[in-house]
Image (cartoon, grey):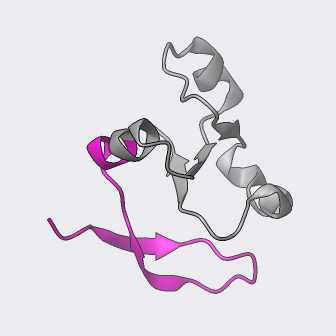
């Protein structure tokens, strides 16, 4: 299955025209295989608190705070941004 393509955030304000999207099933397989994946949960603090869904190991930044937290995002492994 060919991944869906979307635009991506870049701290230098450039936009990469093609960034692969990952399905929930693909992410689950990676997590089950203990592959190195960095997950960013971009939901608002209210939505996050009220949700029963919390991804293990995910770091929570509101999407509007992503740029100021970009140094906390590791390089060299897939980055999954989760939102609702």
| Rendering coords of residue 24 (x, y %) | 32, 42
Coordinates of residue 63 in the picture (x, y in percent): 66, 50
Q: Is 55 in front, or is 77?
A: 77
Q: Is residue 51 above or below residue 25?
A: above
Q: Is residue 1 above or below residue 11?
A: above
Q: Residue at x 27, y 67 (%)?
A: 4
Q: Can you name the residue that lies furthest to the left here?
A: 1
Span colored in magenta: 1-27
Say whether residue 2 is magenta: yes
Q: Is residue 83 left or right of residue 22?
A: right
**Residue at (63% x, 37% y) in the render:** 58
Q: Is residue 20 within the magenta segment?
A: yes
Please tell me in which quadrant of the rendered image residue 75 appears.
bottom right
Residue 56: % across, % down: 58, 28
Numbered label tally:
0
Give above or below for 23 relative to 2: above
Give me the residue at 72% from left, 52% from top: 64
Task: Locate residue 62, reporting x and y percent.
Answer: 70, 43
Quadrant holding the N terminus:
bottom left
Residue reaching furthest to the front: 33
Nearer to us in this view, 44 or 11: 11
Which quarter of the image is occupied by the C terminus? top left
Please report the residue visible at 70 percent of the width from the left and 82 percent of the height from the top.
13
């Amino acid at each position: 299955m060919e991944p869906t393509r979307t635009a991506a955030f870049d701290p230098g304000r450039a936009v990469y025209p093609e960034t692969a999207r990952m399905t929930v099933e693909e992410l689950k397989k990676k997590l089950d295989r203990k592959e190195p994946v960095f997950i960013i949960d971009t939901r608002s603090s209210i939505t996050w608190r009220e949700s029963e869904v919390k991804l293990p190991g995910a770091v929570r930044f509101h999407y509007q705070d992503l740029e100021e937290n970009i140094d906390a995002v590791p390089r060299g492994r897939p980055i999954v941004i989760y939102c609702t």
